[in-house]
């Protein structure tokens, strides 16, 4: 007894000191803020002390470019082969010879591709999915975006298998060697997943030029991490008994891995595959900036020319593609194995044969009937004028309202906030964050936080970093303020949940790029647009985790509450909310990370922050500047993630001992 | 204790044995044990914040017997059986299988031993979710590189043996718990192992199914005559199945003996407590309760020395006369009176029970 009392006393004491230290650091920050002139070196990072990371990285990239041209060239040539093949197969057709004797082998007929999609949908998800796949792909045909859709699909088709295989092997390594995982793989994944998308484009652009190959490489790099994580998680989750069984059956190491562990982890792996596909689609769209072509390029062109209708239409095509690919790969992931009793070649491969037959048959027919190769323009129709008319109508009728609202928010909230964030002294924030890190996670965490924050300051990018923090913070705050109540509402009513769930599922599948299109039409460029697009993009986890957190509160706890006479409100306030708190915090964490990634993309709509740094660097192919700014963004994400995770762990721990 | 063991068992060769086996979990456990000369008390282990999951265990498992390790949750049963099969390395001690030092076996030898001589059944079945029943059962054969036709024929035989015909092409997730464990049993028997480890195979099943599976196991054993190491935390199950039982507590084995030994001669209060609720009439035999023979014994009704009391209790009480107890060779060994039997049934015997 006395032991317990003693130890809680000690914890309490540590708590007090922790609070005091943090309060002290905040006080120091306030002092710096109050005397900006006397302590100017602590408020504004001195220019003279800026470490030229930019130049170093730039020099390194230049060196790479100069000395490894042979490598990049041959790599590009090697990748170009399958890529060109996929382009020809799906979009362009195979051209042979030139001049008079030139002839073309047609690409796969749209009818065949759509039929295969329907067939896949039916096999994996029944009639509903078949209809979804069919309608989706037909829409691509009739909206006359088939060519570009197939270019995008070809890129994904080449990229995804590569990501899956690489991710699988890295994941296996991480599983077999926990040390490599802890010290190398996990930190690299953290960095890669918080690096903004643009930052991936820059080195590729520099090394490989603007081409589908560099787009493919950037996409591959960007989309692999979830597969690594899913593999490690899945393999680590295989029950000990199954591992023991493998040993007892006398499996060799490789038999154990490939015949027991990997197949047992298949459900997790398939979730990884789904994420890879979705990220690849997202990134392929964004890499249209460095020459990927396809649907993303349409959006980009239309956005640059402010052609609202076209942008919306191309955006819609992306959404259709995203929803179809997502639902299909999820259905594949959840498909339970089916026994194949029928023997022989036909019994085992009837599906494959049928699909290839449909593709070949329709393609051969398309030589006779060109409409099956490319639908005549007379049959397609465009929705662009309607979108434009709709937006015009809104602008004419509500311009004043919208504009007033925009200006009001900008002048009264965003601008003052921006100013105060810009004024935050680097040294004070460094101290406060480090102290918070120490309090939540001990010396190790404090050190990590101090180094990362220090990096942000020493690069000389402190002010843009604070600008990013401001936009990201505001957006995450608004997203949480909207998302958590919606999540709570969902958790209390199955009907609401049934309505909200499909909406957030769809929101989650839409590539980040597409969120900008409708908002920019209504609010034009600037911080307000960035904020709204970011909120729409990042609200999903806040809703989902809150709903899930409240719903998973153990039933006994609620019954215990009812028995002890809680009112409904007390039950919620005193039982459900505290128990669900860690889960809700994890949702907020996700929301922050998504906000950060989106706010950077919003550089396209004229924000002024780190994203703009990267964006400019991209347009000038300035690798040093872009990569360093990208790192600062990644570090902001990692700092937020580490602090919140440490906080949640502490909460859980205390709950455990309480 | 050994005096009471049926003679045949003593002569059977030892299949698997361990001497002074320790498994200590925690940082630098091996060095700690070396420093302490291979012995450590609970207090010493606690101080070094180590867990002595198996301590100083010595046992011999003989060919063809069902050897049961019984103990409460956390007593170290699983750790012991995992050491015996070398799924984990014992910290110190000796381990012999078929007279050879199992701890010296190389990786390749170990794989070979496990492929041909050991089978194991797991508490939560450990079936591979992506394979059908047939493929699961054939899996251990398949990794040995046995051809498809042969391994499927052998798997079919095993599936027959556990009465799962007609389910060959089902997936584990489509079977009930009892059926899944039948698959686990069939799979572990497919390689025709010499020694068969079962780690709480029926604990995850509900009581009715559990009984049914115990009966099934006894039927299988009467045909197969494997050497069985069976883990359980259920004393009734142990008594039903065991030739011999080892009782484990806090990593140590506190008594090894036949069910009858444990019931009639518990080594400690802890063992006595386990045996208190047992239906003694089903465990004790005529030999244990008989008195000395008298000159009238020859004229009495006869009962075999090995017969359990429950098997003749009704008859002896009805006749209200003593029975003569006859040994294997037909000689009269003693006499058992209806009074003793009634006392046992009513729980008066030795003041134990309720
Ligand atoms: N890998 C491990 N690391 C540390 N301690 C362990 C490990 N495995 C088991 N233990 C400890 O060893 C002790 C014995 O565990 P074991 O699993 O052998 O018990 P058991 O008798 O099989 O119990 P149960 O009936 O619950 O299966 C327990 O105190 C357990 O906490
Ligand atoms: Mg166990």
Image (cartoon, coloured by chain):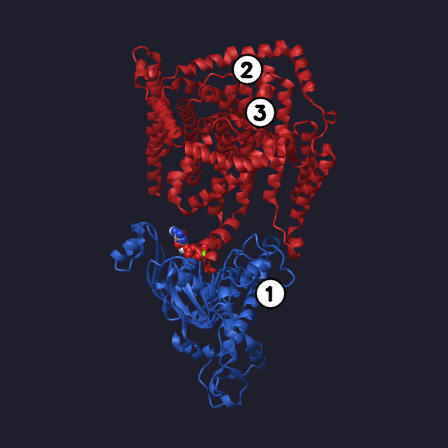
**Disc 1 to disc 2, C-alpha distance:** 71 Å
In the image, residue A181 above or below residue B61: above
Secondary structure state at the residue bearing disc 2:
loop
Q: Nearer the viewer, mark 3 or mark 1?
A: 3
Q: Quadrant of residue B320?
A: bottom right
SS class of the residue under badge 3? helix
Does residue A114 show up? yes
Residue A58 vs residue A647, the one in the foreground? A58
- Above or below residue B3? Residue A313 is above
Would you say A132 lies left or right of B263 here? Answer: right
Say which residue label 1 marks.
Answer: B156
C-alpha span from label 3 to label 1: 59 Å
Number of other residues with Cα within 10 Å of mark 1, as a class: few under 14, some 14 to 19, many 20 or more: many
Image x and y of residue B49, in percent: 32, 49
Is residue A501 visible from the viewing direction of this image? no
Residue at mark 1: chain: B
Q: Chain of mark 3?
A: A
Which residue sits at x=54%, y=74%?
B310
Are marks 3 and 2 in one subunit? yes
Q: Is residue B315 left or right of residue B275?
A: right
Q: Which chain is blue?
A: B
The tag earlier along the polypeptide, 3 or 2, is 3
For the colour red, the matching chain is A
Rendering coords of residue A82 (x, y %)? 54, 38
Q: Which residue is mark 3?
A: A297
Chain of the residue where label 2 is placed in the rendered structure = A
Q: Looking at the rendering, in which quadrant would you find the N terminus of chain B? A: bottom left
Which mark is drawn over residue A525? 2
Q: Nearer the viewer, residue A289 or A332?
A: A289
């Amino acid at each position: 007894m006395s032991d317990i009392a003693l130890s809680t006393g000690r914890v309490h004491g540590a708590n007090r000191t922790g609070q005091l230290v943090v309060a002290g650091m905040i006080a120091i920050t306030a002092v710096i803020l109050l005397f900006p002139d006397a302590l100017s070196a602590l408020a504004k990072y001195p220019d003279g002390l800026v470490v030229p990371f930019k130049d170093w990285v730039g020099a390194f990239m230049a060196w790479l470019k100069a000395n490894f041209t042979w490598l990049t060239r041959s790599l590009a040539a090697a990748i170009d082969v399958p890529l060109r093949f996929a382009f020809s197969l799906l979009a362009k057709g195979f051209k042979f010879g030139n001049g008079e004797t030139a002839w073309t082998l047609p690409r796969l007929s749209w009818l065949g591709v759509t039929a295969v999609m329907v067939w896949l949908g039916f096999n994996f998800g029944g009639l509903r999915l078949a209809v979804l796949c069919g309608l989706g792909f037909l829409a691509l045909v009739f909206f006359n975006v088939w060519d570009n859709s197939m270019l995008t699909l070809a890129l994904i088709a080449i990229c995804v298998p590569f990501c899956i295989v690489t991710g699988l092997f890295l994941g296996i390594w991480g599983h077999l060697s926990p040390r490599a995982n802890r010290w190398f793989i996990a930190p690299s994944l953290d960095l890669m997943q918080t690096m903004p998308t643009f930052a991936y484009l820059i080195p590729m652009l520099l090394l490989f030029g603007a081409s589908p190959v560099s787009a493919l490489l950037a996409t591959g790099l960007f989309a692999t991490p979830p597969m690594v994580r899913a593999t490690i998680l899945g393999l680590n989750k295989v029950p000990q008994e199954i591992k023991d069984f493998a040993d007892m059956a006398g499996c060799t190491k490789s038999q154990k891995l490939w015949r027991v562990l990997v197949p047992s982890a298949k459900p997790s792996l398939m979730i990884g595959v789904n994420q890879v596909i979705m990220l690849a689609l997202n990134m392929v769209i964004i890499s249209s900036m460095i020459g990927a072509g396809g649907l993303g390029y349409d959006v980009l062109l239309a956005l640059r020319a402010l052609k609202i209708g076209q942008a919306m239409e191309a955006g819609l095509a992306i959404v259709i593609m995203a929803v179809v690919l997502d639902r299909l790969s999820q259905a594949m992931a959840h498909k339970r194995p089916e026994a194949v009793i029928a023997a022989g070649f036909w019994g085992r491969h009837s599906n494959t044969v049928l699909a290839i037959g449909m593709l070949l048959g329709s393609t051969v027919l398309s030589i006779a009937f060109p409409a099956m190769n490319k639908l005549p323009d007379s049959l397609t129709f465009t929705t662009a004028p309607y979108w434009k008319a709709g937006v015009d109508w809104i602008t004419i009728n509500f311009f004043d309202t919208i504009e007033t609202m925009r200006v009001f928010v900008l002048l009264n909230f965003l601008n003052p906030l921006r100013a105060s964030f810009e004024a935050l002294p680097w040294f004070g924030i460094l101290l406060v964050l480090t102290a918070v890190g120490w309090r939540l996670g001990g010396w190790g965490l404090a050190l990590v936080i101090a180094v990362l924050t220090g990096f942000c300051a020493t690069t000389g990018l402190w002010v843009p970093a604070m600008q990013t923090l401001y936009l990201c913070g505001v957006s995450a705050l608004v997203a949480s303020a909207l998302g958590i109540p919606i999540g709570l509402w969902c958790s209390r009513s199955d009907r609401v949940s049934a309505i909200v769930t499909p909406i957030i599922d769809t929101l989650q599948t839409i590539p980040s790029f597409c969120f900008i299109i409708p908002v920019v039409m209504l609010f034009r460029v600037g911080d307000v647009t960035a904020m709204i697009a970011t909120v729409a993009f990042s609200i999903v986890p806040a809703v989902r985790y809150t709903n899930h957190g409240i719903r998973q509160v153990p039933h006994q706890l609620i019954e215990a509450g009812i028995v002890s006479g809680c009112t409904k409100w007390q039950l919620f306030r005193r039982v459900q909310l505290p128990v669900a708190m860690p889960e809700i915090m994890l949702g907020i964490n996700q929301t922050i990370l998504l906000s950060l990634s989106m706010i950077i993309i919003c550089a396209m709509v004229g924000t002024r922050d780190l994203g703009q740094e990267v964006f400019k660097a991209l347009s000038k192919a300035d690798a040093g500047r872009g990569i360093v700014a990208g790192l600062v963004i990644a570090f902001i994400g990692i700092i937020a993630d580490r602090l919140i995770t440490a906080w949640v762990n502490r909460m859980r721990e205390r709950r455990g001992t309480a | 204790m050994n005096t009471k063991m049926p003679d045949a068992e003593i002569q059977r060769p030892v299949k698997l044995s361990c001497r002074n086996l320790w498994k200590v979990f925690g940082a630098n456990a091996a060095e700690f044990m070396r420093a302490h000369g291979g012995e450590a008390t609970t207090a010493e282990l606690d101080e070094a914040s180590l867990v002595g999951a198996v301590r100083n265990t010595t046992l011999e498992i003989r060919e063809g017997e069902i050897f049961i390790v019984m103990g409460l949750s956390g007593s170290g049963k699983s750790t012991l059986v995992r050491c015996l099969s070398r799924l984990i390395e014992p910290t110190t001690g000796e381990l012999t299988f078929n007279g050879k030092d199992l701890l010296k076996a190389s990786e390749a030898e170990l794989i070979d031993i496990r492929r041909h001589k050991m089978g194991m059944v797991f508490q939560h079945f450990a079936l591979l979710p992506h394979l059908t029943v047939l493929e699961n059962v054939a899996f251990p054969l398949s990794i040995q590189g046995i051809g498809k036709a042969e391994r499927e024929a052998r798997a079919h035989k095993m599936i027959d043996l556990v009465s799962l015909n007609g389910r060959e092409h089902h997936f584990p997730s489509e079977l009930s718990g009892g059926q899944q464990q039948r698959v686990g049993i069939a799979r572990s028997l497919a390689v025709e192992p010499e020694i068969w480890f079962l780690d709480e195979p029926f604990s995850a099943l509900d009581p009715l199914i559990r009984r049914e599976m115990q009966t099934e196991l006894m039927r299988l054993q009467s045909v197969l005559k494997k050497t069985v190491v069976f883990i359980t935390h259920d004393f009734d199950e142990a008594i039903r199945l065991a030739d011999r039982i080892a009782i484990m507590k806090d990593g140590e084995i506190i008594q090894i003996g036949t069910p009858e030994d444990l019931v009639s001669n518990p080594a400690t209060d802890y063992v006595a407590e386990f045996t208190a609720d047992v239906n003694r009439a089903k465990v004790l035999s005529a030999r244990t309760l008989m008195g000395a023979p008298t000159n009238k014994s020859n004229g009495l009704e006869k009962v075999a020395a090995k017969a359990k009391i429950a098997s003749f209790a009704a008859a002896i009480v009805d006749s209200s006369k003593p029975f003569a107890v006859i040994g294997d060779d037909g000689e009269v060994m003693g006499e058992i009176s209806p009074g003793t039997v009634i006392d046992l049934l009513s729980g008066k015997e030795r003041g134990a029970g309720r």
